[in-house]
Amino acid sequence: MSTPTGERFDPSSTLWRDGRPVYDRRDTVCVVGAGASGLAAVKNLREHGFGVDCYERETSVGGAWNWRHDRSPVYAGTHLISSKPFTQFPDFPMPDTWPDYPHHSQLLSYLERYAEHFDLLPHVWFGTEVVRIEPADDTSWDVTTRSSGGYGSERTHRYLAVVVANGHNWAPKVPTYEGLDEFRGQTMHASSYKDPKELRGRRVLVVGGGNTGCDIAVEAATAASQTWHSTRRGYWYLPKYLLGRPTDQVNDRMIGAGVPLRLRQWLAARTLRLTVGDQSRFGLPKPDHKVFETHPIANSQLIYHLGHGTITPVPDVRRFHRGSVELTDGRHVEADVVVFATGYLPRFEFLAPEILGADEHGRPTLYLHAFPREHPTLAVAGLLQPDSGLFPLVHWQTVLIARWLRLRDRDLQRAAAFWSRASAEVGNRWNRARVKDSTRHWFEVNHVDYLRELQRALDELSPATATARSAR
């Protein structure tokens, strides 16, 4: 048996656990998932001198951005909601000719080229899913895998460390309603929606006010005979462009200029009132929170369709009847199709919940949304919901993971000091706004605050820091 790079396992390194063989990979790090976060982890671990085995249940890279994958939430019309400069990896820019908000097919080609450019594919086991990850001792981990098709026997390998990068937008959060089982119409979660052709000529109710819910409502407006959009509360709908620039770039410039949060909130609300006006005029409920206290909704077309009457805003769903959906205001909607754009829940089925410090709701408790307090050689990559693009944050997050693992190997005293400080900050939110306490915002971070903390941690682990201290 050999690794993806062709290296043969040494039979003499075989260990045993509960009567089954365990193949010792010694100083190799295991990465779970070959999406954007997993690929960044493989690259940065390799650059820090680690051997890496990456396990991917699908047969190609891309994770959520590969819509051919069973678990991908991507649909035909999906584009980025963060602009190109805030989405690209800092060491692998997107082409200048690409639009401000690339299409999902471009994102997949970008990740494929990233993997090819940094020669990552030889380190990936495709068609292999992780079944269990168990502590082997105080520092190493036993990882059990099998073929994604469920065929073949399980194999267990022992690793120096594990980086979990399986994503958190693949396990649908499906609401329960009274009478749902009796409803004669079609229901689906947004994760299974792929193309507006599925809605053509039908009466469609979209439930959920996030970016996906808004996007699907807009797509339904162009294909369905009638479209209703149900939301629980009022939201701030930010246009994708402001002052001639992508909105996230305008917000970032204000942050960079030192504009306080309260002033940025006031300016954003004032700008929306001047450009869009009173949202309640379109039948939308007024927001019950300030701008930036929920995950940004970037959609320039929702207001357009509301103003043209092709989308009808309605309140939350109360219950289902055989032939209709009852709303909280007493109205009934006779929908043929109901799309639940109600988000996702994080799932780490191969890990015991207590390993990640999960609370009673299943929310992991981690430092920088990455490091569990009790397990210094386990990390999670990409468990973030930033107000900007994800890839730059994941890049520096995985650099930190790699640098941390290398420091543990070289300087136990400095490593212990860092871990003591980091453990005290487990559970911090890294967001100055009072973000709503919902599953959608479990991992919400302000990208500037988060990057500053990453920089602080990277500086602590830097070899230059150790040199400066020894010179004193």
Image (tube, rainbow, N blue to C red):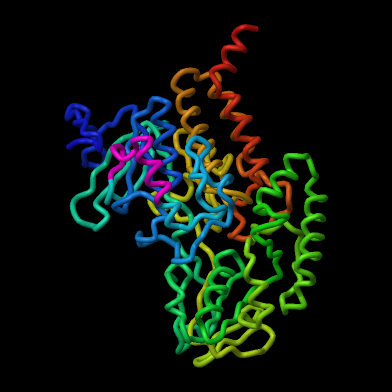
Q: Can residue 347 be seen in this view?
A: yes
200 in relation to 443, above or below: below
Residue 115 covered by magenta stretch = yes
Which residue is at the front of the view, 344 or 95?
95
Q: Quadrant of the N terminus?
A: top left
Residue 299 covered by magenta stretch = no
Query: Residue 124 location, x and y as percent?
Result: 31, 41
Q: In which quarter of the image is the C terminus?
A: top right
Q: Can residue 131 be seen in this view?
A: no
User: Which residue is at a point 37% across and 34% down the rendered structure image?
Assistant: 29
40 in relation to 278, above or below: above
86 in relation to 16, above or below: below
Span shown in magenta: 109-125
Query: Residue 82 location, x and y as percent?
Result: 58, 53
Q: How many marks?
A: 0
Q: Seen in the image, is 193 located left or right of residue 295?
A: left
User: Which residue is at a point 62% across and 38% down the rendered structure image?
Assistant: 451
Which residue is at the front of the view, 121 or 246?
246
Query: Residue 63 location, x and y as percent?
Result: 40, 52
Which residue is at the front of the view, 316 or 19?
316
Query: Residue 210 location, x and y as percent?
Result: 60, 65
Which residue is at the front of the view, 234 or 96?
96
User: Which residue is at a point 50% across and 70% down the rendered structure image?
Assistant: 174
